[in-house]
Image (tube, rainbow, N blue to C red):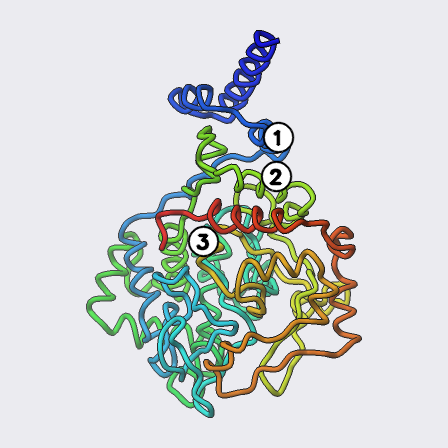
């Protein structure tokens, strides 16, 4: 019997090693993995990894150092905002998980940066949504930006509210042609939002068209400075100063985002690369739940943990008074079938990006998992966290309208989530452990 068990264990180790070899592991990783103590969890996960085609997330396409430096400088420059008081950094802190830690971001006119940011009534307004994390943007399969998908770039055609760069034959194709992916385009739109960066009653907001606003930022605010002339020249060495256009702003910021927030060194990445000790046994159990009865993979698929699609998951809707309903994708497409659907976010570095959901409804990962275990109960028992109100002069309110909440629930396309998940206390703890620690890249704090 002992010889039989020994032979069985050896065969299992060989199978694991061969699977790791197929996944492209190094010779050293194969040797280490084969010699590691293989558990029942590893055996189960081996099948899950194969079935889902899971690998370490690939490297992004490269960018020049000069272009990244220009993008980083633009990202943190308040000159891009109408009142010269807000930058991309204000709501996307590079030291706070690429977000601001607030349920709703607060734009121009506010005080503070990141979680210290506060609304000043009559001077600043809050956006209706949570600040999205910036990890692993700018990849070729990403074609729609924003939580409601209102900006897109696919097959070299832009979809947006700026007609001059959108459609099959845009009048400003010179701007459109600078963009290489949708996250080169996306940074240009907060510059046009009165709530986010543009503001009102300033030299930028006085321009009649969106293109004129962008052009004024480039010409009057950036290229009027010698330092920026030098930065643009280095970033675009084959483009003369007179041939620069607003697209070069977005392209540089997009390059910075893609490289600065690259995240593919989590314990998950190490595990699927062959290091069977990269995850604890509890985290492995959590990963198994993620791909099985937890149903998480239905939306958070692939090595970047997102299907890049739009779904309703029945999130309680909170907002600032006076309350305005957020239709999500439906607000962009004007299709009732799209109401209350929001873009699936990546789960990488999830522990750094609280609060969660499109409106920041949940303070913790535990609260999110609790919501998914019983969405119907979550909708009826939800209460706005007390800490949220301190950031806003306007009053936070919860939508208790029965018809709208039922619609949010009915739009859920995963029947298992509608029925509720049969999770034990330990199941919940294991899944939270995997989401919190298994997907956390140590290169980010």
Percent from the top left, x then y, of residue 88? 39, 68
Q: Is residue 133 above or below residue 85?
A: above
Residue 430 or residue 214, whichever sits in front: 430
Residue 274 at least partly seen: yes
Q: Quadrant of the C terminus?
A: bottom left
Q: Tell me the SS state at disc 3.
A: loop
Q: Earlier in the sequence, mark 3 or mark 1?
A: 1
- Residue, disc 1: 44
* Between marks 3 and 1 in the image, the one whose residue lies nearer the viewer: 1
The image's mark for residue 382 is none
Q: Position of residue 259 (x, y in %)?
A: 37, 50
| Residue 85 place in picture, x, y as percent | 34, 80
Outermost residue toward the bottom? 122
Disc sitting over residue 135 in the figure: 3
**Which numbered disc flags the more N-terminal residue, 2 or 3?**
3
304 vs 78, nearest the viewer: 304
The residues bearing labels 3 and 1 have C-alpha atoms spaced at a distance of 29 Å
Q: Residue furthest front?
A: 1
* Image position of 182 (left or right of 95): right
Tag 3–tag 1 contact (CB < 8 Å) = no
* Residues at circles 1 and 2 in contact by the CB criterion of under 8 Å: yes
Query: Which element type, helix, strand or loop, lies under badge 1?
Result: helix
Q: Residue at x 76, y 62 (%)?
A: 411
Nearer the N terminus, badge 1 or badge 2? 1
At label 1, counting other C-alpha atoms closer than 10 Å, the crowd grade (few under 14, some 14-19, many 20 or more) is few
Which of pointers 2 and 3 indicates the residue nearer the eye?
2
Q: Position of residue 276 (x, y in %)?
A: 47, 30
- Which of the labelled discs sits on residue 288, or is there none? 2
Image quarter hosting the N terminus: top right
Residue 185 visible, this angle: no
């Amino acid at each position: 019997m002992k010889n039989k068990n020994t032979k069985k264990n050896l065969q299992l180790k060989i199978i694991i090693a061969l699977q790791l070899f197929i996944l492209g592991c190094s010779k050293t990783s194969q040797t280490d993995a084969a010699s590691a103590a293989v558990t029942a969890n590893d055996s189960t996960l081996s099948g899950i990894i194969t079935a889902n085609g899971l690998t370490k997330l690939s490297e992004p396409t490269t960018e020049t150092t000069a272009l990244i430096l220009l993008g980083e400088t633009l990202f943190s420059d308040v000159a891009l905002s109408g009142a010269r008081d807000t930058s991309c950094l204000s709501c996307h802190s590079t030291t706070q998980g690429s977000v601001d830690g607030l349920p709703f971001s607060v734009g121009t006119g506010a005080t503070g940066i990141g979680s210290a940011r506060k609304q000043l009534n009559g001077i600043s307004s809050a956006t209706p949504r949570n600040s999205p994390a910036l990890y692993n943007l700018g990849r070729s399969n990403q074609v729609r930006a924003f939580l409601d998908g209102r900006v897109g770039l696919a097959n070299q055609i832009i979809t947006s509210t700026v007609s001059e760069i959108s459609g099959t034959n845009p009048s400003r194709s010179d701007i459109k042609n600078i963009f290489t992916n949708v996250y080169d385009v996306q940074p240009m739109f907060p510059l046009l939002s009165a709530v986010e960066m543009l503001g009102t009653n300033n030299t930028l907001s006085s321009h009649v068209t969106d293109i004129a606003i962008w052009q004024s930022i480039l010409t009057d605010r950036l290229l009027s400075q010698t330092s920026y002339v030098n930065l643009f020249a280095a970033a675009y060495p084959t483009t003369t100063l007179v041939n620069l256009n607003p697209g070069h702003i977005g392209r540089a910021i997009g390059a910075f985002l893609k490289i600065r927030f690259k995240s593919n060194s989590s314990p998950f990445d190490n595990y699927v690369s062959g290091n069977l000790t990269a995850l604890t046994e509890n985290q492995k159990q959590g990963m198994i739940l993620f791909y099985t009865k937890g149903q998480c993979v239905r939306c958070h698929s692939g090595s970047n943990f997102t299907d890049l699609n739009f779904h309703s998951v029945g999130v309680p809707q909170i907002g600032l008074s006076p309350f305005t309903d957020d239709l999500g994708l439906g607000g962009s497409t004007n299709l009732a079938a799209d109401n209350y659907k929001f873009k699936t976010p990546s789960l990488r570095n999830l522990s750094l990006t609280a609060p969660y959901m499109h409106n920041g409804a949940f303070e913790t990962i535990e609260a999110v998992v609790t919501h998914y275990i019983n969405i119907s109960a979550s909708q009826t028992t939800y209460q706005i966290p007390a800490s949220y109100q301190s950031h806003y002069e306007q009053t936070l309110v919860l939508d208790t309208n029965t018809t709208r909440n039922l619609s949010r629930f009915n739009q859920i396309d995963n029947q298992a989530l509608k029925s509720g998940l049969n999770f034990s206390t330990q199941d919940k703890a294991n899944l939270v452990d995997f989401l919190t620690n298994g997907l956390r890249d140590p290169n980010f704090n």
